[in-house]
Image (cartoon, helix red, strand yellow):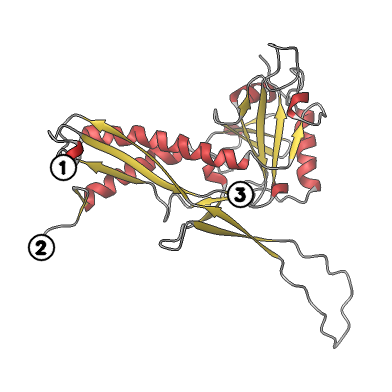
């Protein structure tokens, strides 16, 4: 009985290349890492459902002996997100070794793992960054009011923490703090605060997240070049307008994403010479591809605070 194949690959080869893609993808994502995980159901339509259990009011009335209170009713909000596919491929002119693990295919899949990470993280970031809960450093009412002097500072971090705490936002589970995704330009400004603690100073007793650089006033900071930036969108004279940076601060259960490391793993698709039919009449091309399905939903607007500020030049 012939062994199962996957587009010309054996089961063992297919699993190896899928693992290779995932190994390169996971260390390079930050926004994707911190969403509430959901499995993408198979053959159940193009949506994934997230549930938000809203808070119950405090039960401050004393109980009466022998009398059953009326109780409370669960208030559950369903949030739906549309599943969409993402992927890319490259053409390889070499003849791939379909009998073993091909080094050209392996290196190609590694590069594609990094591409997949950046792609999926940007998709998640764009949904999260469109939240309605916004704080403009400098006290303005819009992005247009952010000037070059309106930088992130320790004082602003304390104010941000206060906003989250007053909204009863819980810290991120496993972090014991709020998380903030920041651009390296913003990291440069806040790391000079005298209360700043580098991540390596608490790494022995605390789990450090991918990209985490330190903490300040109850907020742990994750550095990523994919943090949003709006060039020249702030205040200033024409030609000298401030670049505006988005710092995304989250609490518990802020947004939902698929379980990329579980049932929603990205897939590698490798095809050898001769598999292209009439589009490759001389059997000159092999291809390496990746494909992933993604759905992102903001679950609670108050648990996501977009802070807009300037950065030092």
Query: Dot 3 surroundings within 10 Å: few (below 14), some, or many (20 or more)?
Result: many
Give the CA separation, mark 2 to mark 1.
19 Å
Q: Is residue 294 left or right of residue 311?
A: left
Q: Are marks 2 and 3 in contact (CB under 8 Å)?
A: no
Q: Is residue 18 left or right of residue 104?
A: right
Give the CA separation, mark 3 to mark 1.
41 Å
| Residue designated by label 3 | 255
Between residues 229 and 153, which one lies in front from this camera angle? 229
Between residues 226 and 130, which one lies in front from this camera angle? 130
Could you say which disc has been placed on residue 98 in the image?
Answer: 1
Query: Looking at the image, which residue is at 77% across and 65% down?
Result: 56
Residue 233 can be seen in this image: yes
- x%, y% of residue 68? 82, 84
Question: Which quarter of the figure is the N terminus placed in?
Answer: bottom left
For marks 2 and 3, the one nearer the N-term is 2
Q: Quadrant for residue 212, please give it.
A: top right
- In the image, is residue 216 above or below residue 236? below
Q: Is residue 276 left or right of residue 254?
A: left
Query: Judging from the image, what secondary structure is the residue with disc 2 in?
Result: loop
Q: Are marks 3 and 1 in contact (CB under 8 Å)?
A: no
Could you say which disc has been placed on residue 276 in the image?
Answer: none
Between residues 278 and 141, which one lies in front from this camera angle? 278
Between residues 33 and 241, which one lies in front from this camera angle? 241
Question: Which quarter of the figure is the C terminus placed in?
Answer: top right
Q: How many marks?
A: 3
Could you say which disc has been placed on residue 1 in the image?
Answer: 2
Query: Judging from the image, what secondary structure is the residue with disc 1 in?
Result: loop
Give the CA separation, mark 2 to mark 3.
47 Å
Query: Dot 2 surroundings within 10 Å: few (below 14), some, or many (20 or more)?
Result: few
For marks 3 and 1, the one nearer the N-term is 1
């Amino acid at each position: 009985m012939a062994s199962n194949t996957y587009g010309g690959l054996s089961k063992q080869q297919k699993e190896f290349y899928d693992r290779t893609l995932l190994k390169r993808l996971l260390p390079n994502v930050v926004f994707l890492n911190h969403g509430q995980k959901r499995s993408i159901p198979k053959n159940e339509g193009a949506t994934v459902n997230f549930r938000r259990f809203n808070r119950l009011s405090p039960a401050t009335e004393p109980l009466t002996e022998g009398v059953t209170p009326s109780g409370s009713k669960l208030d559950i909000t369903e949030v739906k997100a549309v599943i969409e596919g993402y992927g890319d491929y490259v053409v390889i002119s070499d003849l791939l070794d379909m009998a073993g693990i091909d080094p050209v295919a392996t290196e190609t899949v590694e590069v594609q793992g990094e591409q997949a990470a950046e792609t999926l993280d940007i998709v998640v970031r764009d949904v999260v960054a469109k939240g309605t809960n916004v704080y403009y450093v400098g006290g303005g009412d819009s992005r247009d009011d952010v000037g070059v002097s309106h930088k992130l500072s320790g004082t602003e971090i304390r104010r941000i923490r206060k906003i989250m705490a007053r909204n009863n936002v819980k810290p991120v589970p496993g972090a014991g703090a709020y998380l903030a995704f920041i651009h390296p330009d913003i990291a440069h400004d806040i790391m000079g605060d005298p209360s700043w603690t580098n991540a390596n100073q608490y790494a022995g007793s605390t789990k450090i997240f991918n990209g985490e650089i330190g903490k300040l006033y109850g907020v742990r900071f994750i550095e990523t070049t994919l943090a949003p930036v709006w060039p020249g969108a702030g205040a200033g004279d024409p030609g000298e307008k401030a670049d505006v940076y988005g710092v995304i601060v989250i609490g518990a259960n802020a947004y939902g994403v698929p379980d990329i490391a579980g049932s929603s793993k990205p897939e590698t698709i490798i095809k050898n010479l001769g598999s292209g039919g009439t589009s490759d009449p001389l059997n000159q091309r092999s291809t390496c591809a990746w494909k992933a399905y993604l759905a992102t939903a903001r679950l609670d607007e108050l648990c996501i605070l977009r802070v807009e500020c300037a950065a030092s030049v």
